[in-house]
Amino acid sequence: MAEPIRHDKTARQLRLLSDALDSGRLGPVRRMVNTLSPAEIGNLLESLPPGKRSVVWGLVDAEDDGEVLVHVGEEVRESLIADMDQDELVAAASDLDIDDLADLVEDLPDTVIDEVLKSMDRENRERLEQVLSYAEDSAGRLMNPDIVTVRADTTIDVVLRYLRLRGELPDHTDHLYVVSKRHQYLGRIALQALLTHEAGTPINQLLDDEQPAIDVNETSAEVARQFSDHDWISAPVVDDSNILLGRITIDDVVDIIREQAEHQVMSAAGLDEDEDLFSPVRRAFRRRMLWLTINLATAFLASSVVNQFQDTIAHLVALAVLMPIVAGMGGNAGTQVLALMVRGLALGQIGGTNIGVLVWKEVRIAIINGIGIGLLLALIVLAWFHDAKLSLVIALALTVNFTSAALAGVFVPVTVKRFGFDPALAGGVILTTVTDVMGFLSFLGLATLILVR
Amino acid sequence: MAEPIRHDKTARQLRLLSDALDSGRLGPVRRMVNTLSPAEIGNLLESLPPGKRSVVWGLVDAEDDGEVLVHVGEEVRESLIADMDQDELVAAASDLDIDDLADLVEDLPDTVIDEVLKSMDRENRERLEQVLSYAEDSAGRLMNPDIVTVRADTTIDVVLRYLRLRGELPDHTDHLYVVSKRHQYLGRIALQALLTHEAGTPINQLLDDEQPAIDVNETSAEVARQFSDHDWISAPVVDDSNILLGRITIDDVVDIIREQAEHQVMSAAGLDEDEDLFSPVRRAFRRRMLWLTINLATAFLASSVVNQFQDTIAHLVALAVLMPIVAGMGGNAGTQVLALMVRGLALGQIGGTNIGVLVWKEVRIAIINGIGIGLLLALIVLAWFHDAKLSLVIALALTVNFTSAALAGVFVPVTVKRFGFDPALAGGVILTTVTDVMGFLSFLGLATLILVR
């Protein structure tokens, strides 16, 4: 089982840093911060309340500013950018690779973007514009146009001479790409192959044309899937005419996978993964208010069901005591099915071909659980209220609600997804509405039939 | 915003495959399956109900069997292993790298393990035993002992000659490691550096000793953090005496990050990330029963609060109609705080130094939301029940419950974690118990004080 608690090391660093900040000696703080990687600095800044965050941000080495901005969530990024003047922003942005700059550019003030574009040479400016021309969650946005290409009709020693002349390769280069005269992608050569074969070996003997190139318009989610299903370190990106445009590297894919995971966890609570832990109260309030209002509407739906049974409840107040149990337990059972389904949908594992089998499996589990938990519940209620009929009613109602929960757990996320919404976000609200309504309806309805009349 | 829907391509494949299976022509199915990578085959098998799963598993190329077993969740793995005879299992296991084999070995029958060990040479057997001697979630288990080392007192051309003689390098080799005579880790040489420097360059000029080696007992969660914070592709693993034992590569780290993410999503619903979408009803039932029983106990806690107010409810049945709203809305508000906290704790962003600021922020949001949503709620209740005092009671109770939810949202996960439990697993149950109890108590209590007496 994976350990979900990510790192106590960061928590320790945070404590040390906080102590140093509190003591007012900024020298040690600066030294401590600048031993960290940009991602670690970003994580640290995210964990600091606004005041301390500004102080520490001012102590970060200017050369790391750009990378740190790339690594923090959008809300925190805005707060950091607000702390910088134009010259600092231009300098920070100018240090970045094209793909990182493309990621940042939308959050920068227009005047800064103009300055950055002016400071770039024509080739890089064109590259940036090209990257920005692709959709936000596409391979085009993820790719780095900085690639090393070689021709197929040469030999290893010629390539080695070229590389020595060229000097350093782009980060995470594990392959050189082989292109045609028209820059069409033909295949790739592993650096490993260059090192383990004799100098005279022709390049086309080493050519690996098995890995398919990624289409520039592919979604970033699909890119992430391909990388993790094939254990790729990097992959070439091509356009419709198979022209090589750039490459995507695993480090950016890891960021996407992390974001997807955060998105799933946060959206189940109606939050955005870019939410700042310390976002200003006014801003946080507005966003949560929306979510709570949606939930309020669904709560009234459930209440209106209870309202229909006022006479029944007046006749036997114990029903008011027990009704939250039936509704709540249905919610718990449904949430389990929902979690399985949301994961399955995210992995593309669920479709028209297996949904029938899934429903049947879940309904059987619901009925068995209904009988098991229902029996337990009936015994407790019998001991508490000494009313055998009430015991029967609650056990029956629970089984009905578990079954509704199973059906809703399977069909709600599938339907939500079919309508183009996010099952993780909308699924939970709709599901608990179903289980609340069905819980109250079955329990109070059965009570009216069996107990009151 | 990250796209949470992972891939419709897999869903499409699944449909095609299901059609082919239904038609009974297994030739096309076999061809289709064997164009996929082991991870893709694993994903496909996970999405098939037991019967079809067995059929497709029988069609997978024997050489992929081992890798597929490594890539599926534990429950599915057991079902696949049950379909294989001893010879197939031995063959599958023997094809694997040491780190993958270590991952699989616990799920294999003892007789198979004996056969596999017998078929290995002494060096590999010792390596496997070494890897297995480390804790399950440690760097030692993740590492692959298959590494290429060079000595510092040599030059590039000597290394190149050695590599050409050696032939192929282990997968994902991006660095060679430099060790002392006693095999202590000194630093690493990028393959890039070997390619871009002149043949006569001494190795020690290229030595990069900046990346710290990973301690073999480090947790896999911490390893994952370091990889993603530093954009590593691979990292060396050493023991207490700095002896180089192996290396960890990014592809295994990506698997860990995915598992952590699944764990968070699934454990919030009391499920295990290894749960099979199609696990046998009896097995699924037993596991879910446990979770539902825990939830039943907490539901009774909330009911016992309502029970104290039977007289009040008998006096005004509208209270029974409205009480689920106050409890449920508190749950929704608290879940939002909990999601923020679980993420923050997982990222190590929360500690004694900032928890006060967080509580104060969340309490302020709760009070503002209490007033906002409370006012809305009061107006609706006034229009519905024409009772100004009832409106006042529900608005006050909601604000009290939002505040309890904020406090519970912050302190429950922190406390749960401090006691060594998983905040994602236990946090939600405890939180909703608090908000249910406080919701019923504040609403019915205030109603008793203001409306009844």
Image (tube, coloured by chain):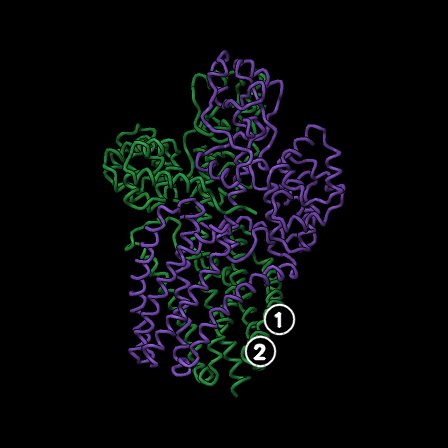
Chain colours: A green, B purple
Q: Nearer the viewer, residue B364 or B117?
A: B364
Q: CA distance from mark 1 to mark 2?
A: 16 Å
Res A336 → quadrant: bottom right
Horizontal arrangement in the rendering, residue A332 relative to residue B409 (left or right): right
In the rendered image, the vertical position of residue A141 relative to residue A119, given as above or below: below
Q: Which residue is mark 2?
A: A382
Q: Position of residue A387 (x, y in %)?
A: 56, 82
Q: What is the chain letter for disc 2? A: A
Q: Amino acid at mark 1?
A: Ile
Quadrant of the rendering where the C terminus of chain B is positioned: bottom left
Q: State the residue position of label 1.
A: A371
Query: Does the image show residue A270?
Result: no
Name which residue type carries label 2: Leu
Residue at the image position 69 percent from the left and 55 percent from the top: B51
Residue at 49%, 76% in the rendered image: A441
Residue in the foreground of this view, choosing between A299 and B58: A299
Above or below, comparing residue A40 to residue A189 in the picture:
below
Q: Is residue B138 above or below residue B247?
A: below
Label 2, secondary structure: give it: helix
Crowdedness of circle 2 by 10 Å Cα count: few (<14), some, many (20+)? some
> Does the image show residue B179?
yes
Chain label for disc 1: A
Instruction: Give x and y (percent) for residue A324.
Output: 47, 72
Q: Position of residue B116 (x, y in %)?
A: 73, 37
Furthest residue toward bottom: A453
At which x and y percent is residue A89? Answer: 27, 35
Which mark identifies residue A105? none
Which of the two labelled residues, at mark 1 and mark 2, occupies the earlier sequence position?
1
Element assignment for label 1: helix
Outermost residue on the front side: it is A23
Nearer to the camera, B200 or A153:
B200
> Relative to residue B340, is residue B274 drawn left or right?
right
